[in-house]
Amino acid sequence: MRGFHVYYDDQCEVCQAGVSWLRVLDRRGVVDVIALSSVPLPAGLVMENCLRELHVVIAEKTYVGWDAVARLARLFPPTWLIGAVGAVPPFSWLGRGLYRYVAANRHAVSRCRGGVCASAKPAEVRRRTASGAFWTCRSIGFFWRLPLVVGVWIASLGTNLRAYVRTFRRRITLLDGRLTLLFLGSPTADFVPLLFGERFWAVCYDGVMIDPGSSKMRGSLRRHLDAQPLAITTVTATHHHEEHSGSLEWLAARSGAELALAAETSKRLRTLRVPWMRAMIIGQPPNLTVAPKTLGERVPTASGGVLQVIPTPGHSDDHVSFYDPQYKLLFAGDSFMGGYFSSPNPDVDSLAWIETLERLLNLGVEILVEGHGHIHTLSNLVPDIPDVVIRVAPEEELRTKLNFFHWIRRQIEIGQSEGMPPAAIAATCFPWGSRWSWERFGADLAARVLSGGEFSRTELVRSFQRRGAGGVLPEVYEMESSRPNQV
C-alpha cells in the first residue's frame, strides 16, 4: 500500500526531473506520484497552492515545499542524510528560502512550449515562457538526469550483450517447421546488435525467404544453409536497405529460387550506393544484374498457401510486408521497429507510416515478426524464447507506435502555430519528463555520431515535415552559441 501521495506540477522541468529520481529510488513502491493535471485534487488541497509548492500527503498530515522534499529524502538510504539535515534549523530555513525562490520563478524556467507539458494552466505558462528560459531549463533537465541517462545506457549495453550471446548465429524453427529464423552477422555488423540491440536475421516461411541479409553477412547465411539446407522457392525482401537486400541475387542463384521484388525496390537496387559508414559496417548491396519478377498481390508458398503482399511505406517508400491470414502472421520487416524508435534514417516518411500502422491494425495480427530479431505475440503457437519472443499483443504494440507518431505530429503542429524556432520544436518532441526520451538518449547519440548525423532524432522530427517547409531542423541536443530569439 502506497502511503505517500506526492502532488507535483507537471509543467515544471525541475519537478519532472525530481520525479524521475523519485521513481528510481522508490524500489519498495511506497510513493504514489500524481501530476496535478491528471486527477481532481482531494478535499483539503487547493490547486493554486499545489502549483506553487510540492505537496506530500501522508494519512492526515500534509508536507509542503521544502518540508515535503526533506520528508521524501528520508525515505531512501542514498538521500536520508540530506533529508535529516534539511529538516532541522538552520538548514531547514535555507532549504525553504531556496525552494520558495525557485517556485516563485518557475514560469521563467519552464520549457512548456509546443504543448509538451500537460500543465494545469497551459495558456499562462506559454505566455510567460521565453526561448532563453526554454533552453536554460532544457539544459538543467539534461544535466539533472545525466546520471540516469548514463546508468540506463550502460544497463542497456549489458542487455544487448546477453541477447547477442543467446542468439549468436542461432537457428530457430517454429510453427511445425513452416517458419525458420536464421540469425546473421559479421565481425563488423555485430557492432549494431551490441550497441543498439537490433539483431539481423533471415526469415524463411514455407519456402519463401524474406530479407536474406547483407553482403557482409553472407558467410553466416551460407554456413546456416550448408549445415541444414532449406527448400527455397522464392527469394524476396521487404525493402531495399542493405541489411535486407545484400544477398538477394546470390541466394536466388544458389537455391535456384525465383527472385521477386516490389518494382520500386528492384529499381533502387540497380543503382543503390549506401553511405560509406553503412557500407563499412553492414555492407554495400551489389547492384542487380538480373530482372526480378515484380511482386503482385500474393506470393505462393511451397505447401500451396499464399502470403499477401501489403504495401507498407513509411520506413522507406518501397517497403512491403507479408501476411498469412491463416495464422494471422505478419512479416512486418521494418514497418514496426519498436514503439519508440526515435533515431531513423533520412528516407523515413512518418506521415505515410501513420497510414501504414492504421492499415496494419485492421488486419487483426496475432503474430508479428519484425525485421530485427523479435517476435511479438500472445499466441501459444509460439513458445517462449528468451530475448526473441515478446509476450505483448501485436495490436497493442502497433497502437503504441501509432500513438507515439500522433503525439509527435501534434507537438510539431502546436510549435509551428506558436511560432517556435525549429530547434525548439524538435526539443519539445523529446521531453526529459518522458522516460523513453532520456532512456534512449545514449543509444540515439551513439547512432548519430557513428552515422555522421544520418540516423538521428532530427530525422524523426523532419520526417513529419512537408517538403520545402520549415527549413533544416538542427539536432535537439545541440547547444546554441548565441542568445535565442524571443518567442
Image (tube, rainbow, N blue to C red):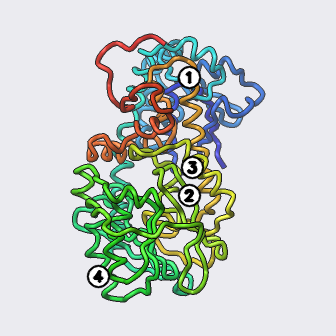
Q: Which of 453 and 254 is in front in this view?
A: 254
How far apart in space, not on screen, are marks 3 and 2 (Cα)? Answer: 18 Å
Q: Is mark 4 on a helix, strand or loop?
A: helix
The mark lying in front, picked from 2 and 1, is 2
What amino acid is found at the position of numbered circle 1 in the picture? Gly
Q: Tell me: residue 88, above or below residue 30.
A: above
What amino acid is found at the position of numbered circle 3 in the picture? Lys
Residue under pointer 1 = 65
Q: In this view, does 371 lie to the left or right of 284?
A: right
How far apart in space, not on screen, are marks 2 and 1 (Cα)? Answer: 55 Å
Q: Tell me: residue 206, above or below residue 477.
A: below
Residue under pointer 4 = 223
Label 2 vs 1, first from the N-terminus: 1
Residue under pointer 2 = 311
How far apart in space, not on screen, are marks 4 and 1 (Cα)? Answer: 65 Å
Q: Is mark 2 on a helix, strand or loop?
A: strand
Residue under pointer 3 = 401
Q: Tell me: residue 138, above or below residue 404.
A: above
- Asked if one can make out residue 30 in the rendered structure from this viewpoint, the answer is yes
How far apart in space, not on screen, are marks 2 and 4 (Cα)? Answer: 32 Å
How far across and how far down the image is residue 57, in percent? 66, 33
Q: Nearer the viewer, residue 283 or 450?
A: 283
Label 1 vs 3, first from the N-terminus: 1
Label 4 vs 1, first from the N-terminus: 1
Q: Tell me: residue 413, above or below residue 189.
A: above
Q: Is mark 3 on a helix, strand or loop?
A: helix
Residue lying at the far front of the rendered structure: 291
